[in-house]
Image: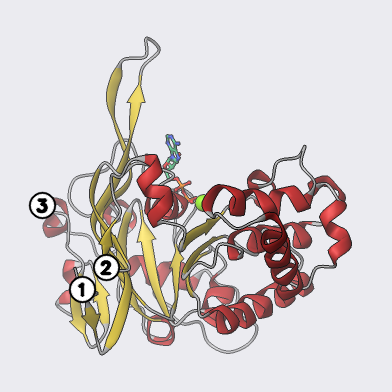
């Protein structure tokens, strides 16, 4: 299949109606329902862009990243990466096709074996995925180590002997050795102090340029997302509720959930992006979602129409998409 063209851009990843449901079991291990961690997500990622995925804890950001990466088997839907369908492949086929698609774990330590020195952790993916001889593997590891600004002496250290920021760099180095084209960064700055965050963010931008990368940038840190991303997708309980160019979404959020999420960002001076309302209460239990729009139980605009059907993500104005029946009629 040829790669789809969109808005004059080449798409690198196109997911359609992707769902990942986890079974809910009772005390006797009997399945009693499904937890819809992602439910019917469609999204196209343009080659070369940084697309942010934001939303409250538990809305399905990591599950989305892991399902795209093949760590979770999708319940349904399609994942087209560089023109090829990669959903539902066997682990072997999946490994072959997904070398150029990589995912960095939310917890950097979890991708590194605590018993292995960093050198072995960096060499292992090359051993598994390539047929490069030992010398060439070592040359590639040294090149990538330099690209992420880590000294060669780190090859001899264990993960617990390096800092959180350095673990991030090692995690990045580990996937970059495989020459990916798309990298899913899951909460890449969480747990880092502000100055380390700044250097890591700059490193992402440098590496993007150097290795011609596309990023899916998963984060709950809205200011970092605003700084880094060309577009953002806002998720609520397993679905994308708003999608658009970052600045446009930040300046005039359309979906009531995005409005409330952005109004929660602390402001130093100046006016809030939206004065509409604050996000109150907790999201409903994901295993027992309300009918219709799952945001309706927290939404000040909710009425009968919101109970009746799940609103689809609609291309409303320009490159803006949202999934709210009221914002689509300009009533929000
Ligand atoms: N392996 C799993 N088995 C069962 N349920 C899971 C599994 N992984 C995630 N979930 C559930 O799926 C939902 C989405 O979880 P996920 O980790 O994707 O959220 P998230 O948006 O990444 O949250 P956070 O911001 O806290 O990282 C949650 O309700 C979670 O409990
Ligand atoms: Mg997560």
In what element is the residue under mark 1?
A: loop
Count of numbered circles on the image: 3
At mark 3, the secondary structure is: helix
Q: Do the residues labelled 3 and 1 touch (CB within 8 Å)?
A: no
Label 2 vs label 3, nearer the camera: 2
Q: Give the side of residue 218 with respect to residue 14, left or right.
A: right
Out of 124 and 193, give the one closest to the viewer. 124
CA gap between label 2 and label 3 equals 37 Å
Q: Mark 1 points at which residue?
A: 2
Name the spot of residue 264 as percent of width and height, x first: 52, 68
* Place of residue 295 in the rendered image (x, y in percent of width and height, measured from the top left): 30, 56
Q: Mark 1 or mark 3, which is nearer the start of the sequence? A: 1
Please identify the quadrant where the N terminus is shown: bottom left
* Up/down of 319 relative to 153, above or below: below
Left or right side of 270 for 142: right
Disc 1: residue Cβ within 8 A of ligand 1's nearest atom: no
> Does 314 sit left or right of 218 as displayed?
left
CB-based contact (under 8 Å), mark 2 and mark 3: no
**Separation of marks 3 and 1 at Cα, in angstroms:** 38 Å
Q: How many neighbours does mark 3 have within 10 angstroms: few (below 14), some (14-19), or many (20 or more)?
A: few
Q: How far apart are marks 2 and 1 (CA)?
A: 6 Å
Q: Could you tell me residue 179's position as x and y percent? A: 54, 68
Mark 3 — residue?
Answer: 308
Q: Is residue 60 visible?
A: no
Residue 265: name its quadrant. Answer: bottom right
Q: Name the residue under label 2.
A: 83
Question: In which quadrant of the rendered view does residue 133 lie?
Answer: bottom right
């Amino acid at each position: 299949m040829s790669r789809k063209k969109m808005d004059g851009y080449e798409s690198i990843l196109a997911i359609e109606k992707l769902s990942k449901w986890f079974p809910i079991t009772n005390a006797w291990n009997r399945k009693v329902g499904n937890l819809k961690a992602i439910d019917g997500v469609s999204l196209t990622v343009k080659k070369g862009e940084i697309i942010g995925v934001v939303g409250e804890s538990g809305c399905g950001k990591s599950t989305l990243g892991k399902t795209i990466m093949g760590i979770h088997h999708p319940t349904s839907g399609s994942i087209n990466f560089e023109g090829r369908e990669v959903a539902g492949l066997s682990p072997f086929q999946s490994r072959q096709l997904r070398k150029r698609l990589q995912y960095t774990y939310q917890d950097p330590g979890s991708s590194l074996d605590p018993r292995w020195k960093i050198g072995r952790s960096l060499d292992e993916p090359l051993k598994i995925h390539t047929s490069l001889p030992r010398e060439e593997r070592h040359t590639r590891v040294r090149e990538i180590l330099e690209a992420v600004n880590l000294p060669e002496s780190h090859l001899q250290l264990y993960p617990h002997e390096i800092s959180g920021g350095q673990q991030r760099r090692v995690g990045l180095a580990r996937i970059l050795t495989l020459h990916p084209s798309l990298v899913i960064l899951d909460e890449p700055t969480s747990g880092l102090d502000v100055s380390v965050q700044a250097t890591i963010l700059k490193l992402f931008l440098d590496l993007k340029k150097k290795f011609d990368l596309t990023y899916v940038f998963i984060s709950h840190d809205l200011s970092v997302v605003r700084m880094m991303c060309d577009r953002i997708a806002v998720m609520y309980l397993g679905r994308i509720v708003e999608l658009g160019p970052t600045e446009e979404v930040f300046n005039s959020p359309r979906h009531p959930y995005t409005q409330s999420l952005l109004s929660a960002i602390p402001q130093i001076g100046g006016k809030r992006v939206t004065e509409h309302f604050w996000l109150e209460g907790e999201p409903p239990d994901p295993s027992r979602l309300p009918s219709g729009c799952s945001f309706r139980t927290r939404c000040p605009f909710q009425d009968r129409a919101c109970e009746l059907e799940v609103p689809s993500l609609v291309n409303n104005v320009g490159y803006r998409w949202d999934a709210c029946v009221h914002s689509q009629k300009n009533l929000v």
